Structures are given as C-alpha cells and as structure tokens.
Amino acid sequence: MIQWTRKLRAAFGASFLWLICLIYFTQGFRSFVWTAVSYQLKDRLKLSPSASQFVFSIAFFPWSIKPLYGIISDCIPIKGRKRIPYLLMSTVLSLVPWLILGLNETMRSSKWNLIILLTLQNFGSAMADVVVDAMIAEAVRFERASLAGDLQSMSWLAMALGGIFGSLSGGYALTNLQIDTIFLLFSVLPSIQLFSCGLVEENPISSQVLPDISYSESSNKVNGNNSDIDGDIFSDKKLNKSTSRRKKSKKENKKREVVPGKLQSPEKVNSLFSSLKAAASSLCLAFKKPIIFRPMAWFFLAHVTVPNLSTVMFYYQTESLKLEASFLGTARVVGWLGLMLGTFTYNQYLKNMKLRRILMWAHIGLTLLTILDVVLVSRMNVAFGISDRIMVLCGSALSDAINQFKFMPFLILSGQLCPPGIEGTLFALFMSINNLGSTLGSFVGASLASILNISSGSFDNLLLGISIQVFCTLIPIAFLFLIPKEATGISA
C-alpha cells in the first residue's frame, strides 16, 4: 500500500493526489451533514414525508445537468485556465450555504430558503465532481495512461472512507450536537478544499494565441482536449523532436498572434458560442445513435418507473420504530460495506455474465428486498422474533450491494459506448441521465406518498405504498430488450 502510494505520488505529485483524495473524501463524507438535513426537515420544519422528499428532489437536481459544467469548463477558460478557477468557484458554492445555514437560524428555518441554499450547495458539489474527473482524465493521458486505474481506485477508496466515517460520526453528532453546529463542522472540509486548490498548478493557455477550437475537424476537441490549448504541456518534447516542426509552429503562431488591445470582443464571443454550439451538437449526434440511446433509456426507465420511498421509510423508522440517529448512521456504514461487497462480487463472479441476465436478477433481488419492507411495516418480523434493527441492517447492506450490481453494468456500458474523443462529456451525460432518473423517481415517490396521505405520525397506507413499489420494481425487466443482447461485463 505504501509503495503503491509512493508510485502515484511520484507520477502525479503529492499536492495533486491530496486534492483529488480530499474532494472524493468530502463527497463521501456528505452523509455526515445530509442526515442532519433530514432531521431538520422532519423535526424543526415539521414537513411531511412527501414534502421532505420533494425538497431533496429539487436540491439534488444540479447533479442531473453535469455535462453543462463540463462543456462550459472545456470551452470557456478563465484567465487562461480551464480547471482550477472552476474548482475554486464550485468549492465556494459548496461552502457558503453550510456557513449560512449554520450561522443564520432564519435561513435554516424556512423551507424555501433551505431549498435554495441546498440546491446551490449541490450545484457546487456537482461542478467540483465534473472538474475533478476532467483533471484526472487529463492527468493520466499519454505516458501516464497505465496509472489510470490506480488513480481511479484511490479516488473510490477515498470516497468510501469518507462515507464510512461520515455515517459513523453523523449519527454520533446528531445525538450530542445541535444541527447548526453540524453544518458548521462540515464546512471545515470545503474550507480545506478551497485552500488546497492553491497547491495545484495548472498550465495556462497563452493569452496571445486564440484557442482554435474546431469540433468538426477532430472529435477530441469536444472534450477540451485541443492540441492548441493543452499541447503546451508537452511543447518541450515536441520542440526537441524536429527543428522544422518548431519553425512551422512559429509560423502558425505568428498567423494567429493577436496584437494586445486590438482583439475585438465580438471575435471572442463568436468563438465561445461556436465552441459551445459544436460541443452540444456533437453530444446530440452521438446520443441519437440507437446503440447509445437504447441502453441509456433503460437505465432512465429503471429509475423513473420505481417510486422512491426512502424518505418515507426514514420517517417510519424514526417515528414508529423509534430508531436512534446513531443506529441509522451504523446502518449506512453497513450499506457502504455492502456497496464494496457488491463491487467485489461483480468483478469476481459476474463480469462474464450477460448484462441482461445481471440486470434481471438485480431487479428480482430488489423486489425481494422491498418485500422485506412489507414484512417490517406489517410487523410480521415481530411475530417471528426478528428485531427491527436486524431487518433494517440486513435491508441496508443487501440493497446497496444489489444496487451496485445495477450500477456496475451502467458504468461498463457507458465506458464502452462512448465514441472516441468525447468520452468525458458523453460519460457525464450518461451519469446525468442516471441522476435525472433518480430525481424523477423521488418525485414519483413523493407524489405517491401524498396521494396515499402518508404523513408524519400517520403511516396507515404505507403498506399499500410499498406494495405498489414491489410491483413497479418488476416493470424495468419488461424493457430489458433495450440492452444489447450479447453485452457482458467485459464487452458490449
């Protein structure tokens, strides 16, 4: 482990590794503060389960438009830099809302103020996620491509550790601290992240040379991988290769050289708009291909057709079952362990299986786990002498493991279907479709809870709602024809 870390440190630098791990650790540690948000909505604002789920659905919407952040950061550099300025802005956006909520009681006591601040916070977190993914992609290009898997593994490890520590400490914090203190404590991590951005240097784009972005000539430029923009990192190697190439480069630069003060702003504006338009057009053309559209449509439908009742179950567990915040934190830790177990199981035993079969059994498994919720709500487990805590822990671990069986094929198909040159932006689009489906599934769940009049202290119709969820979980199986028939975990 130490040698592995030293190898990555020698390849990428300590400051870069620190920033990457810190951002991913913070993403996982968000469970520390979002549990407090759940209790704020339930206990302080006295919102119904459907209203709380509505708040979460709106607040997490920024994760559904991730490609927009990628296109903007690729096409519109700030002072010659495409990553660090956007990372600074996104970090500020993810930091300030927690400071406001921690210091201002009026802001955290208003539902709409809370929605606005939480949405801004997620906007910052989602943008940071896109930017750091782009930084990783750029860092492993060319001679460091062999370390791509190692860097990604370190990122996931940091996020998993953040999730485990966040869940454990979040339950303890809710038992012993005020919610405003929890908000302020969490703001320490984005604050450290803000200062850490200054430790990483980014090579600027020359202010004397216009970025000649032309998406029609090379699809690589959709992702911001333009040789005119990013090639200065490797300019020394290129100059050493050929004297004639150096002369040619100088001539080209002279042609594109701009006399300071004579560059007219309309030229800049037209260049930026044409770049953005070309990037969006390339995405649309790629996404219209059936081999790409059909699988993504299935993953979207798999979320939309199943009502998400997680917030309703949170209310039921805390009010009817009287489960403490510390125990729910432990349940989330078990969920993270289940997620890692699901990843290991998939890689070891399932990656050679047909994806249609994996996804079918995953939804059958999720249906059986939803039936466990039926047993819990109907109190049948008590008749068999099984405690509520055991039911919740088993359900949390198994559901996260099985959901990982769904998510891994999604990642594999996304990576395999991305055309060369626009991998990063199109992959962000795939993730956004997945996130949008999840958000809409939450809206469907909130609507179902509202229709059934499920409210705080009134869970008479919860059993009916979960029964509907059991039926809906089987619906995506009917659309598995959208997944490529011969696709497996290692080939599409």
Image: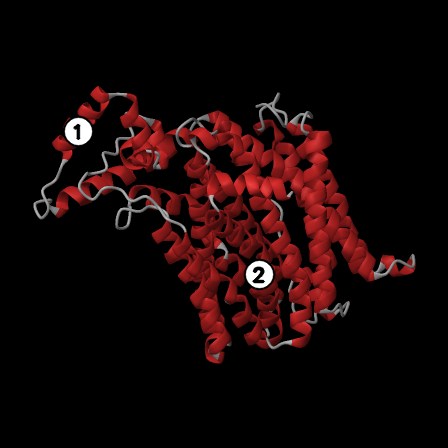
x and y percentages locating residue 429 in the rendered image? 45, 40
For mark 1, give the secondary structure.
Answer: helix
For mark 2, give the secondary structure.
Answer: helix
What amino acid is at disc 2? Gln
- Check the picture and name the quadrant holding the N terminus: top right
What amino acid is at disc 1? Lys
| Residue that mark 1 sits on | 250
The label number, if any, that marks residue 53 in the structure image = 2
Total numbered labels placed on residues in the image: 2
Q: Nearer the viewer, residue 483 or 211?
A: 211
- Which of the 4 image quadrants contains residue 378? bottom right
How would you rate the neighbour count of disc 2 (Cα within 10 Å): few for under 14, some for 14-19, many for 20 or more?
Answer: many
Q: Nearer the viewer, residue 282 or 320?
A: 282
Q: Are marks 2 and 1 in contact (CB under 8 Å)?
A: no
Please report the residue visible at 62 percent of the width from the left and 64 percent of the height from the top: 35
Please report the residue visible at 43 percent of the width from the left and 67 percent of the height from the top: 96
x and y percentages locating residue 154 in the rendered image? 58, 44
Q: Is residue 105 above or below residue 489?
A: below
**Eye-nearest disc, 2 or 1:** 1
